[in-house]
Image (cartoon, rainbow, N blue to C red):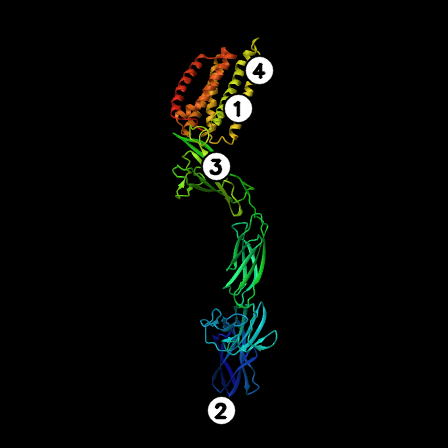
């Protein structure tokens, strides 16, 4: 007898990680009516069986094919005996292992421990999860092994021929006792996992296993912990979260905080602001429910507070410049401080204007990142709290104003108190002292500052000009030392009076651009007196003209910048000419030969004109430009 393999063909993948291989062969030389018995060989292992006479036959084998692999396949002749094996090498393809895993659903009803019941079944929409690259096919499951665990500990186990099954079935083995019966879930309920292993007919290349989680609520909700966290918006505010297993419907939470305050909520969350300077925030919560048999439960938590302290915010300090009158305006700047400095601080300003303004006693608000602001809009607009309009602060009316502030920021507790408000007055130009008008004591003090600076400048120039001449005379040698003493004393007096004027608390309402005002008053007064001495020292002509030129230029600058009237400028010239006239008399006493008559004549005419102008301005009610 002769057996010849004519060909070997590979077929499709089976879905079980195998591939069909068909051996085609022919048999000849058998006696008539006899059959040869043959089995297939896969790497020496028998598979399949066929009887074949003197004809062409084929035998199909299943080869594992989860990867490209070579096998030695062939035929073994069982009858007649004594024939050698016939083998050939064949390569298989890469066939996927298409074993699906069960997609389990868990339906929970009731609560633990009394009425809790769980139904385990394959998901109605998608009962099986198929591997990628596999075609879904009909599945025949012959059995399921289920195991329920919690926290990684196996609790119950059973086998069933089919799904669904229920936790109340009398077929679950309690793994802690070995007793078989229904499942009784613990009174605290919990989160459980059910694992399932399915036995599938014809699919053996991999295990078919899946799992699902389910939660059984306790009939009495369980308070398992309390957590406190900083709110993130206020360093003294803590958010407390109670962790509860089960439904909190109908539950009350009574919170007691370490600062002695208490509150009751129906929510398992509460936010509480502790007083500033608190270093440790604590809370205790007692949860109670109305359901019979459920006892109150308690939990506590402590949270350290490192930034729960209030900085010192100073009372807002207003500085008023100018006054309200014909052609005159006023302005105000506001300042405060925060100690120690706190990053991210914002200052909230509120200014109340007097009745009778265009805003009729409204409040204006602004928030800045800096510690200072003005009535302008350079750092942001003011908002009229009554109308919502934005723009500059309305300071167009003389009268009493008030400013209040608060400091806010992510590192400043909301419970921090604000400093006391501070009032300020915008004066009316030319009004009498007291109330909201001009403080004449402050005005006279300012004029004395200008007067003594002019006297000091003139004393120094007289000392350097006439001093050498007078020192050479027999009867005038004593005068230069006196001039030096006068120059030093006048300089010290001028500086001292300036400091006093700036720091006196009741001398508010400083003139608009007061530094420019003093500058031009002193420059014009000094320049005029310097021109008087050109008879003795011609160089004083240059000094006087330069000083006069600077003074007139600064006067124009101040006049335009502060929008002053001619009357207001004339009023401020009065102390200048008073100083000049007084100094002429002084020079006529100590050095009469140095006086220039032409300069005296010019000053006389100007004095006469100024006197007439002041009389006219007084009739119109014009006063100084400010205190």
Depth order, front residue of 203/331: 331
Separation of marks 3 and 1 at Cα, in angstroms = 30 Å
Judged from the image, the secondary structure of the residue bearing numbered disc 4 is helix
Q: Is residue 41 above or below residue 598?
A: below
The front one of 87 and 467 is 467
Q: Is residue 180 above or below residue 429?
A: below
Give the labeled residue for mark 4. Answer: 481
The residue identified by callout 2 is 33
The answer to whether residue 117 of the structure is visible from this angle is: yes
Provide the secondary structure element on which disc 3 rests: strand
Q: CA distance from mark 4 to mark 3?
A: 50 Å
Dot 1 or dot 4, earlier in sequence? 4
Q: Residue furthest right?
A: 177
Residue 413 in the image: x percent, y percent? 53, 47
The residues tagged by marks 2 and 3 sit, at their Cα atoms, a distance apart of 131 Å
How much space separates mark 4 and mark 2, taking CA atoms?
162 Å
Label 3 sits on residue:
423
| Mark number displayed over residue 494 | 1
Foreground mark, 2 or 1?
1
Label 1, label 4: how far apart the Cα atoms are: 20 Å
10 Å crowding of disc 4: few (<14), some (14-19), many (20+): few
Q: For numbered disc 2, what is the local secondary structure?
A: loop
């Amino acid at each position: 007898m002769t057996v010849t393999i004519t060909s070997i063909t590979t077929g499709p993948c089976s879905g079980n990680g195998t591939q069909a291989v068909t051996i085609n062969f022919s048999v000849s030389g058998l006696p008539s009516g006899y059959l040869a018995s043959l089995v297939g060989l896969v790497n020496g292992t028998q598979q399949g069986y066929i009887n074949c006479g003197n004809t062409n036959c084929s035998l199909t084998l299943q080869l594992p094919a989860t990867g490209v692999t070579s096998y030695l396949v062939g035929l073994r002749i069982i009858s007649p005996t004594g024939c050698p094996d016939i083998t050939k090498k064949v390569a298989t393809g890469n066939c996927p292992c298409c074993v699906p895993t069960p997609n389990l659903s868990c339906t929970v009803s009731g609560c633990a421990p009394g009425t809790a019941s769980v139904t385990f079944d394959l998901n109605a929409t998608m009962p099986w999860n198929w591997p990628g690259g596999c075609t879904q096919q009909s599945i025949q499951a012959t059995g399921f092994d289920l195991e329920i665990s919690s926290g990684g500990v196996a609790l119950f186990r059973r086998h069933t021929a089919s799904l669904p099954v229920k936790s109340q079935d009398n077929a679950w083995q309690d793994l802690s006792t070995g007793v078989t019966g229904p499942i009784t879930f613990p009174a605290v309920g919990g989160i459980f996992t059910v694992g399932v292993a399915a036995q599938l007919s014809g699919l053996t290349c991999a295990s078919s296993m899946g799992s699902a989680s389910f939660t059984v609520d306790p009939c009495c909700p369980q308070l398992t912990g309390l957590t406190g966290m900083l709110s993130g918006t206020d360093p003294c505010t803590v958010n407390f979260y109670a962790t509860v297993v089960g439904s909190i419907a109908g539950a009350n939470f009574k919170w007691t905080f370490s600062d002695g305050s208490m509150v009751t909520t129906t929510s398992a969350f509460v936010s509480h602001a502790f007083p500033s300077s608190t270093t440790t925030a604590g809370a205790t919560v007692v949860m109670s429910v109305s359901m019979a048999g459920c006892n109150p439960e308690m939990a506590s938590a402590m949270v350290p507070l490192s930034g729960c302290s209030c900085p010192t915010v100073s009372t807002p300090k207003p500085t008023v410049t100018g006054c309200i009158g014909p052609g005159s305006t006023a302005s105000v700047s506001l300042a405060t401080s925060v100690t120690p400095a706190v990053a991210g601080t914002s200052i909230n300003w509120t200014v109340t204007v007097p009745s009778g303004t265009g805003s009729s006693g409204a409040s204006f608000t602004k928030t800045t990142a800096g510690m200072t602001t003005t009535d302008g809009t350079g750092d942001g607009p003011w908002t009229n709290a009554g109308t919502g309009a934005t723009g500059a602060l309305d300071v167009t009316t003389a009268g009493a104003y008030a400013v209040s502030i608060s400091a806010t920021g992510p590192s400043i507790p909301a419970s921090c108190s604000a400093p006391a408000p501070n009032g300020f007055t915008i004066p009316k130009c030319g009004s009498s002292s007291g109330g909201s008008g001009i403080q004449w004591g402050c005005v006279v003090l300012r004029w004395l500052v200008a007067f003594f600076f002019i006297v000091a400048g003139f004393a120094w120039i007289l000392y350097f000009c006439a001093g050498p001449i007078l020192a050479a005379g027999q009867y005038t040698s004593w005068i230069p030392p006196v001039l030096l003493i006068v120059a030093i004393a006048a300089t010290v007096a001028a500086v001292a009076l300036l400091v006093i004027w700036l720091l006196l608390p009741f001398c508010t309402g400083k003139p608009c651009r007061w530094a420019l005002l003093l500058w031009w008053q002193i420059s014009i007064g000094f320049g005029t007196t310097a021109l008087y001495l050109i008879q003795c020292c011609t160089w004083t002509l240059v000094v006087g003209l330069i000083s006069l030129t600077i003074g007139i230029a600064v006067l124009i600058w101040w006049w335009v910048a502060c929008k002053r009237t001619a009357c207001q400028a004339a009023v401020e010239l009065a102390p200048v000419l008073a100083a000049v006239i007084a100094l002429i008399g002084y020079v006529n006493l100590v050095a009469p030969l140095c006086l220039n008559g032409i300069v005296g004549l010019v000053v006389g005419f100007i004095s006469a004109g100024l006197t007439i102008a002041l009389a006219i301005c007084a009739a119109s009610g014009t006063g100084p430009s400010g205190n």
